[in-house]
Image: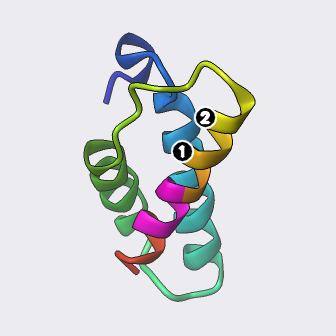
């Protein structure tokens, strides 16, 4: 994943998905290897074209967390 080249809010999407996946791993709900799968799938699914304002970032964060939780 090259989030830097994607730009926009891709970094926020990656971060939110990673936080959800790591939390699930630490709780014993998923194996370690699922973290990268969940993060990658979330980055692929959640459109991150917007990301120029705090409102945009907050919306992307919420969408990414919802998407990641749906994969647990």
Asked if the stretch drawn in magenta spans residue 66, the answer is yes
In this rendering, is residue 34 above or below 15?
below
Does 40 sit left or right of 48 as displayed?
left
Which of the labelled discs sits on residue 22, or is there none?
none
In this rendering, is residue 28 above or below 51?
below
The secondary element bearing badge 2 is classed as helix
Does 58 sit left or right of 70 as displayed?
right
Tell how many labels. Answer: 2
Applied colour scheme:
rainbow
Which of the labelled discs sits on residue 60, or is there none?
1
Residue occupying image coordinates x 26% and y 44%: 44
Residue occupying image coordinates x 63% and y 36%: 57
Bounds of the magenta segment: 63-67
Most common secondary structure along the magenta stretch? helix
In this rendering, is residue 41 above or below 71?
above
- Rendering coords of residue 29 (x, y %): 51, 88
- Rendering coords of residue 64 (x, y %): 48, 55
Which quarter of the figure has residue 49?
top left
Does the residue at mark 1 contact the one at mark 2 (Cβ under 8 Å)? Answer: yes
Does 40 sit left or right of 50 as displayed?
left
Q: Quadrant of the C terminus?
A: bottom left
Q: Quadrant of the N terminus?
A: top left
Instruction: Check disc 2: other Cα within 10 Å, few if <14, some if 14-19, many if 20+.
Output: some
Residue lying at the far top in this picture: please name it.
Answer: 5
Residue for badge 2: 56
């Amino acid at each position: 994943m090259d989030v830097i080249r994607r730009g926009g809010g891709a970094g926020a999407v990656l971060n939110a998905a990673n936080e959800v996946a790591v939390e699930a791993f630490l709780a014993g709900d998923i194996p370690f290897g699922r973290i990268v799968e969940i993060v990658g799938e979330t980055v692929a699914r959640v459109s991150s074209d917007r990301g120029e304002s705090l409102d945009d970032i907050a919306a992307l964060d919420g969408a990414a967390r919802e998407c990641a939780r749906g994969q647990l």
